[in-house]
Image (tube, coloured by chain):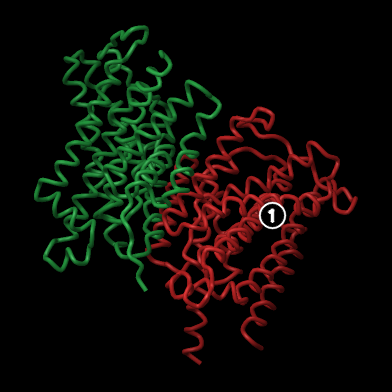
């Protein structure tokens, strides 16, 4: 079997496995995994940019837009269908990414990182100052329906979990297709030397603008799913610590593979929950230490461990 | 007329504050090409240190004038100490890696230091109001000006002038300018770039702590004050052009005056005016007002 086909099959099997065991998982693990996989979609978007050498420090901008879009639709209209509201979240986030892209796509490296941070802080400021949107408290999100079916009790959490998994599988597949397309393959060349890519007759700024929109849509879907899962939105979703968390997971996972985003996101949520549980005052310190150690000793992320193991096996056989 | 006068004075005070926190950031960026997120920690440590120092000094009823000096020196000593730990302990191992990776390293250290602050000072907030009271105020027409604020503007002016003098006329400053222009050529001419890096980082750390120390009496010293400062200082530095001291001064003035204007004329815009000015400037000059032209490397 070819490499992509084998990893797609592996990925599909993994998704079916984590979906099948859900009814036997403890409820806290279901909720944790739901949020972890919803956030992994945002991380997928970050990996797309990271491969080009760009690190957005304000991806929470699109995450919050997706989440607030879902919340506002629930509040002002009678539309409850999860697929419709998620689509709306994705569209609004995509439009926002397209608009800020005109400014951001001109920048690289640190300027790109900090300008995107500034953008997300503007949204945070607006949300905090707007009384009708609940100010710092945020507001409740109406429960979603699945084609008219309204799950109750335990089934609500499980349905959302399966919904997130379904979206994760489809998006992971689409993103891996994107990585193999011409636009996706140009990521590393842009990172290595932009001018050479320009000389090939390709507009780097436009490519980066496209990548921004794609990653914005992914973040919007992630935010919409998170809003449906938590049933609450608040301005903290746009705060820089949220963005920092996404960057953290990207570093932890590494940009090597699509699957690593999901594993990394799950590991991050577990570490965070355990750290908050055991040492509530010092969890930032633990996160910072893990991040520092990852950058110093595992620069390609968790995903590279798998590659290393495989290489060792190949060398042995 | 009164409003115009108030805008100018408020703007100048705010600009002085912005300049004091931004100058350390722009210095480190100019020399080392590192966007130092831990600058926010330096600021926070400086503010907490100054609050502690104010407590020690003024509770004993020692003369006021010495209190100002003690607060500033205490804060800068703390800045020096954590600066040494960060630079020698971690940063020197990542010189030469991608700029963005180095930003993430400083971000990780920032996260760690945020909790170190809680460990040392606890989660409660501190007030270091004594210097404001000790300095008193004067009336200019219908407006009451705090002498502490006037002192802040003077201090910013002194730092700006001293920075310019040191860069242009001292031996170390000239070496620094060479490293800013081209690190490799400087090294080839026998300048010990590693030492220049360390010294620059420590100066930047002390400036950050000083910024925190002078602001401590004006704010409530509480958790999370470091975060705002990073974003604000970055905005100022981006407007002026990363790595330029003059740029930081002009950027601080522009941002300070426009924020004061917003506060007095349209208060709703206060939060956004800084970013609006930044977007406007960057729309015309993508890398700031005083940015150097970067050669294209093929």
In this rendering, the answer to whether A58 lies above or below A302 is above
Percent across and percent down for residue A96 are 63, 50
For the residue pair A169 and A207, the one nearer the viewer reads as A207
In this rendering, the answer to whether B62 lies above or below A20 is above
For the residue pair B253 and A277, the one nearer the viewer reads as B253
For the residue pair A313 and B269, the one nearer the viewer reads as B269
Would residue A263 be seen by someone viewing this image from the given angle?
A: yes
Q: Which residue is mark 1?
A: A221
Q: How many numbered callouts?
A: 1
Give the chain ID for the green colour: B
Q: Residue at x 20, y 53 (%)?
A: B198
State the residue lying farthest toward the right. Answer: A148
Give residue A120's quadrant in the image.
Answer: top right
Where disc 1 sits, the SS reads: helix
In the rendering, what colour is chain A?
red
| Left or right: residue B7 compared with residue B205 | right
Percent across and percent down for residue A142 are 79, 40
In this rendering, the answer to whether A126 lies above or below A270 is above
Would residue A277 be seen by someone viewing this image from the given angle?
A: no
**Label 1 chain ID:** A
State the residue lying farthest toward the bottom. Answer: A317
């Amino acid at each position: 079997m070819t490499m992509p086909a084998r990893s797609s099959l592996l990925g599909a099997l993994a998704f079916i496995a984590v979906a099948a065991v859900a009814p036997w998982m403890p409820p806290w693990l279901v909720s944790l995994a739901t949020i972890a996989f919803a956030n992994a979609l945002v991380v997928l978007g970050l990996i797309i940019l990271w491969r080009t050498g760009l690190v957005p420090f304000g991806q929470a901008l699109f995450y919050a837009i997706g989440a607030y879009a879902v919340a506002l639709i629930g509040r002002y209209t009678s539309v409850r269908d999860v697929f419709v509201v998620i689509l709306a979240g994705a569209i609004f986030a995509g439009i926002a990414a397209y608009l800020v892209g005109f400014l951001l796509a001109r920048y690289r490296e640190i300027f790109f990182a900090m300008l995107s941070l500034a953008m997300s802080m503007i949204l945070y400021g607006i949300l905090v100052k707007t009384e009708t949107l609940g100010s710092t408290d945020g507001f409740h999100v109406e429960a979603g329906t699945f084609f008219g079916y309204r799950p109750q009790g335990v089934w609500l959490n499980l349905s959302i979990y399966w919904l997130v998994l379904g979206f994760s599988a489809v998006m992971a597949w689409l993103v891996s297709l994107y990585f193999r397309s011409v636009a996706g393959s140009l990521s590393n060349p842009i990172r290595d030397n932009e001018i050479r890519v320009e000389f090939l007759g390709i507009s780097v700024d436009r490519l980066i603008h496209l990548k921004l929109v794609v990653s914005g849509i992914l973040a919007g879907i992630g935010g919409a799913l998170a809003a449906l899962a938590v049933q609450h939105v608040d301005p903290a979703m746009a705060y820089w610590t949220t963005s920092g968390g996404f960057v953290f997971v990207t570093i932890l996972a590494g940009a090597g593979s699509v699957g690593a985003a999901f594993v990394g996101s799950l590991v991050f949520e577990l570490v965070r929950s355990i750290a908050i549980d055991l040492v509530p005052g010092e969890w930032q310190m633990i996160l910072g230490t893990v991040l520092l150690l990852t950058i110093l000793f595992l620069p390609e992320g968790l995903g590279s461990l798998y590659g290393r193991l495989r290489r060792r096996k190949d060398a042995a056989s | 007329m009164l409003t115009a006068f108030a805008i100018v004075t408020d703007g100048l005070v705010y600009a002085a504050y912005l300049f004091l926190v931004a100058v350390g950031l722009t210095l480190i960026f100019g020399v080392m090409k590192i966007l130092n997120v831990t600058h926010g920690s330096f600021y926070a440590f400086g503010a907490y240190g100054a609050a502690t120092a104010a407590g020690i000094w003024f509770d004993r009823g020692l003369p006021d004038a010495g209190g100002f000096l003690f607060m500033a020196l205490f804060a800068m000593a703390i800045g020096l100490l954590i600066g040494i730990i960060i630079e020698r302990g971690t940063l020197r191992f990542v010189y030469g890696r991608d700029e963005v990776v180095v930003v993430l390293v400083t971000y990780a250290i920032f996260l760690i230091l945020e909790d170190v602050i809680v460990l040392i000072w606890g989660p409660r907030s501190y007030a270091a109001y004594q210097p404001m009271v000790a300095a008193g105020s004067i009336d200019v027409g219908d407006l009451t000006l705090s002498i502490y604020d006037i002192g802040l503007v003077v201090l910013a002016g002194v730092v700006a002038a001293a920075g310019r003098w040191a860069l242009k006329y001292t031996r170390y400053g000239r070496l620094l300018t060479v490293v800013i222009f081209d690190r490799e050529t400087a090294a080839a001419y026998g300048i010990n770039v590693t030492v220049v890096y360390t010294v620059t980082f420590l100066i930047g750390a002390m400036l950050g702590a000083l910024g925190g120390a002078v602001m401590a009496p004006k704010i409530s010293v509480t958790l999370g004050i470091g975060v705002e400062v990073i974003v604000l200082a970055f905005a100022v530095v981006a407007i002026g052009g990363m790595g330029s001291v003059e740029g930081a001064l002009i950027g601080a003035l522009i941002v300070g005056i426009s924020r004061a204007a917003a506060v007095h004329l349209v208060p709703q815009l206060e939060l956004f005016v800084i970013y609006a000015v930044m977007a406007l400037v960057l729309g015309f000059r993508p890398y700031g007002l005083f940015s150097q032209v970067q050669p294209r490397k093929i």
